[in-house]
Image: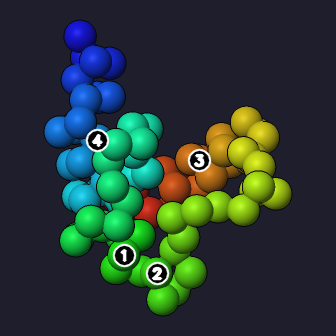
Amino acid sequence: MFINYLTSQPAQSVALLKYGFRPTLSSVALDEPGSPFQQFAANGFKIALPPQVAVPAGSVLNTLLDFWSRNVKR
């Protein structure tokens, strides 16, 4: 039930507008007012990623999470 809630349209919209996460549902518009994709477009925040952008390796993601927890999350 929790996964269903997290992947629902309302929860995905909140994740985008309040927290800046890219939604998993293609029905959630990335360019709606208040979206970070719209707010920060001038800074290079892009809706469409080029095909050469690959998902980082798991070790890279773990390092980023570790860095975040040590330096940003307080």
Q: Secondary structure at mark 4?
A: helix
Question: Which element type, helix, strand or loop, lies under badge 3?
Answer: helix
**Residue linked to disc 1:** 38
In this rendering, the answer to whether 70 lies above or below 65 is below
Colouring used for the render: rainbow
The residue at which mark 3 appears reads as: 66
Question: Which numbered disc, 4 or 2, marks the residue that appears first in the sequence?
Answer: 4
Let me know if residue 15 appears in the view. no
Q: Residue at x 46, y 81 (%)?
A: 41
Residue visible at 21% across and 49% down? Answer: 14
Placement of the C terminus among the 4 image quadrants: bottom left
Mark toward the viewer: 4 or 3: 4
Q: Is residue 18 above or below residue 23?
A: below
Of label 3 and label 1, which has the lower sequence position? 1
Residue 55 screen position, x and y as percent: 72, 45
- On the image, numbered disc 2 is attached to which residue? 41
Determine whether label 2 and label 1 are within 8 Å by CB: yes
Which numbered disc flags the more N-terminal residue, 2 or 3? 2
Badge 1: few (under 14), some or many (20 or more) residues near its Cα, within 10 Å? some
Q: CA distance from mark 1 to mark 4?
A: 16 Å
The residue mark sitting in front, 2 or 3, is: 2
Q: Amino acid at mark 4?
A: Gln
Is residue 28 visible in the rendered image? The answer is yes
Q: 41 left or right of 15?
A: right
* Cβ–Cβ under 8 Å for marks 3 and 1: no
Spatial CA distance of label 4 from label 2 is 20 Å
Q: Nearer the viewer, mark 3 or mark 1?
A: 1
